[in-house]
Amino acid sequence: MIWLKCKNWIEERYDIAELKKLAKSKLVPQHCYDFLYYTGGITLFLFILQFITGMLLVFYYIPHVDFAYESIIDIVTKINMGWFFRAFHHWGAQLCIVFVFIHLFGTLLTKSYRKPREFIWVTGFILLVISIFFGLSGYLMLWDERAFAAVRVATGGAGNLPVVGSFIKIFLRGGTDVTGDTLIRFYAFHVAILPVLSLLLIGLHLLFVQYHGMSVPVSLEKKDNKGEPFFPNVFYKDMMIWLVVLGIVVTLAILLPPEIGKKANALAPPPEGIKPEWYFLFMLETLKLFPGTIYGFNGETIAIVCVSIGIFFFFLIPFIDRKSNRGERSPIFTIIAIVFLLYFITMTLVGFLS
Amino acid sequence: MKYFTRILFATLTIFAFNSLAFAEEKIPVFPTTPVDVYTIYASLTIFWLAIIGLIVVIKMKLNEIERIQKLGIDREDKEAPLLE
């Protein structure tokens, strides 16, 4: 009864029937690669979960160099279900980045970035960068020796970029070295700046997707593709997949809760066998391939420049791939996408196993 | 003999506690009480059962919707006479 009253109350004020009609008229193409459409939905769902668990954790976290580590221990050992929400936030972040990568490479291989969807790619790419920075800034919140060393290496690596490197390094660290100022800065990024930016970009990304509709791969464009209504068909399928993802995150959080190392000490040497988060491993392994000096230039700087050029090229693909924009097949960019993907997987595995 | 045993016991105790003091303390990131562990694993099992149940319900609902869509009875018939 109350439900009906509420429904009537809303329907008197807003044209819900028209919205329902719109949702039903929105068609999602059906083809052999349509499973890739769900990766975007999964990423969105994981982002929502991260926002919720992050809000719960921020009630108890203290962003101060003397109390950050202790507050995490308190969350894990004293707060009711604190250990679970921390582990959930950790695994949610890992899976979120995995699905952002799958979504990105799926878009790249099916050429969904082609005209007129360039801005969907641009907003998605910036969201990937934001997700990685979310990961890095969240990692430092723990303030243990592993996080401390990883952030020192990552920000130091950014400092090797010519011209702007030094500025980026000092801006990120809030000084010349990783200190309490870096923690406060990363905290501000993690809980205020990045969430606002990501909300704006997610909104824009979804708006562009609604405006242009779902893309169909070039090879299947001329075939008669049956469309499936977004509501309720695809929406229900999304719900089923989201439930499974939720189950996986909960299971990982319970079976593999992330460990806490020793408290960070700026004067202590970094622990042996230290590795950054998995999504930075390919970069670390690339740096290892370069010698210390190349024709008198700093090898690390050249490596960072090469990686940056590679990433920038990746970002510009929708504007470079003219054939796809004309609706023709462009096998060169498929090969480039596969090479990028294989390089990323191989170097990450090498970094993981070494 | 009695004193010797006492001294030996005391020495061993001191060494044992000393080694414990130097052992690396691991922060428990998961409840350690057996009853809590049992409750958590039981809850996880129930949670998965609930997820599977919900998926089955949604799938059944989706099948029904698809059947109706195939029959074409979900579409509005524009030529249907209106009852006033």
Image (spheres, rainbow, N blue to C red):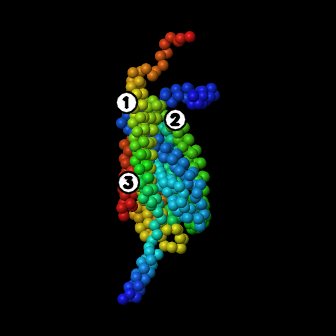
| Left or right: A193 as drawn, with respect to A288 | right
- Residue at 46% in and 75% down: B21
Q: Nearer the viewer, residue A246 or B23?
A: B23
Residue behind mark 2? A210
Residue B18 position by quadrant:
bottom left
Q: Sequence-wise, which precedes: disc 3 or disc 1?
A: 1
- Chain of the residue where label 3 is placed in the rendered structure: A
Residue A354 x/y as whole percent: 36, 64
Measured in 3D between alpha carbons, the distance from the residue under mark 3 to the one under mark 2, in whole angstroms, is 32 Å
Q: Nearer the viewer, residue A322 or A76?
A: A76
Q: Are marks 2 and 1 in contact (CB under 8 Å)?
A: no
Measured in 3D between alpha carbons, the distance from the residue under mark 3 to the one under mark 1, in whole angstroms, is 33 Å
Does A41 sit above or below residue B28?
Answer: above
Q: Sequence-wise, which precedes: disc 2 or disc 1?
A: 2
Q: From where the camera sits, is residue B52 visible?
A: yes
Does A111 sit above or below residue A84?
Answer: above
Classed neighbour count for the residue bearing mark 2: other residues with Cα under 10 Å, few (<14), some (14–19), many (≥20): few
Residue B50 x/y as whole percent: 42, 42
Residue behind mark 3? A345
What's the mark number on residue B43? none
Q: Secondary structure at mark 3?
A: helix
How many discs appear?
Answer: 3
Q: From where the camera sits, is residue A136 visible?
A: no
Classed neighbour count for the residue bearing mark 1: other residues with Cα under 10 Å, few (<14), some (14–19), many (≥20): few
Residue B2 position by quadrant:
bottom left
What's the mark number on residue A223? 1
